[in-house]
Amino acid sequence: MKAVLSPILVVSLLKAGSVQSFARPLSSLRMTSTVTEAPEKITLPDSLVRQEDGPDGNFPMRRKMEQMLREAQIKITKEIAAIDGGAEFHEDSWAREDGGGGRSRVLADGKVWEKAGVNLSVVYGSMSQEALKVATERAAEKVEGMEPEEKVPFFACGLSCVMHPRNPFCPTMHFNYRYFETDNGIWWFGGGTDITPAYVNADDMKHFHGTLKEVCDRHDPEYYPKFKAWADRYFKITHRDETRGLGGIFFDDLDDRDSEEIFEFCKDCANNVVSAYGPIIEKHKNDEFTQKQKEWQLMRRGRYVEFNLVYDRGTIFGLKTGGRIESILMSLPETARWEYDAQPEPGTPEGDLIDACKNPREWV
């Protein structure tokens, strides 16, 4: 028996404490979203950045970041489609009524990936101070001197991605790289790349984290240990007392040096997503697996859904600022599973993953 749940209903139930799990024989849930009005689709212009829109600020950096992320989107989706070998990315461009727009590229029903999406967004306008608190931990200093109900002019440009493979031994991967500006010349970068396997493979994690460390070390040897620890904190599912996966790097509010330096770091990270992730998929995409192992993967996807709808800043920020719902919920897997009080035995492969999620490990 299958059930269809709206993601918004799932998050409402989670926040109300009503959803703990679903008992057998319910095998999986197909995650769907409903849009009441079709988004306006457009032919993407050469740039979505216009000098007359958004707060006064660093327009050359806005254009530079957008162009870099556009190129990364094409590069990543081309390389991922080649690994999949069975499906291509569907593309649509869209306009945002309040300012800006974007381009979504989604692969569905592939040989390797059940669902993979890479979404470019360039948005601007004004947001509530409550929404700014979601976007940054340093909201208080960024609204200093403003009246309590005063709106905050903003510009945001980002590239976000989630990939959900079919095989339980192929991990889910997520990345996001973004640039924000608000009034009074305030700007910052944020982002990261992280991995969510259903099973622990130490060699895979050494490759993934090792690649990220090499990128970080090219820019600042303090970046990897700092951003790895930040990822372990950020991706924690507090109500489960465990992390969503096995981490990676995460950073936000990065403005402690010249913006060009941070831009080059973000560019290097985005251009090495596939080199960190692709070899792991190639290694395991044809691995044999059992029905029980598939069910375990779907349960871990359930944890992924819980984190994204309850804690993820990007999801909450998008909902609070009237973002495009299909892009915001692109991160959700097509299928996920909850079992009542599922507790894997210590010493099993499943128990080892839970231990690694409750006690983050150092991989390199």
Image (cartoon, rainbow, N blue to C red):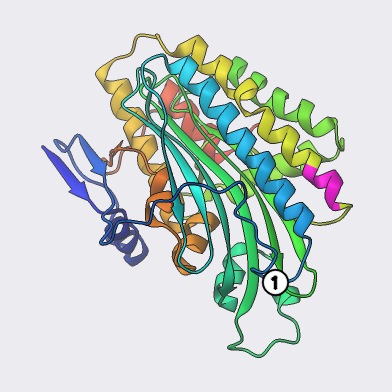
117 and 75: which one is in front? 75
220 and 186: which one is in front? 186
Span shown in magenta: 259-263
Residue under the image location 50 percent in, 69 percent down: 98
Q: Quadrant of the image for the N terminus? A: top left
Q: How many marks?
A: 1
Q: Quadrant of the image for the C terminus? A: top right
Magenta stretch, overall SS? helix
Residue at which label 1 appears: 55
The secondary element bearing badge 1 is classed as loop
List x then y, in percent, for residue 173: 52, 32
Side of 298 relative to 191 (left or right): left
Residue under the image location 56 percent in, 47 percent down: 235
Residue under the image location 75 percent in, 59 percent down: 59
List x then y, in percent, for residue 317: 52, 63
Side of 170 relative to 109 (left or right): right
Q: Would you say residue 173 sits in the magenta stretch?
A: no
List x then y, in percent, for residue 26: 16, 38
Q: Would you say residue 262 sits in the magenta stretch?
A: yes
Residue under the image location 40 percent in, 43 percent down: 303
270 and 252: which one is in front? 270
List x then y, in percent, for residue 323: 45, 61
What's under tag 1, amino acid-wise? Pro
Crowd class of label 1 (few under 14; some 14 to 19; many from 20; radius 10 Å): many
Asked if residue 51 is positioned above or below residue 146 in the image, the reply reads above
Q: Would residue 362 be seen by someone viewing this image from the given angle?
A: no
Side of 10 relative to 321 (left or right): left
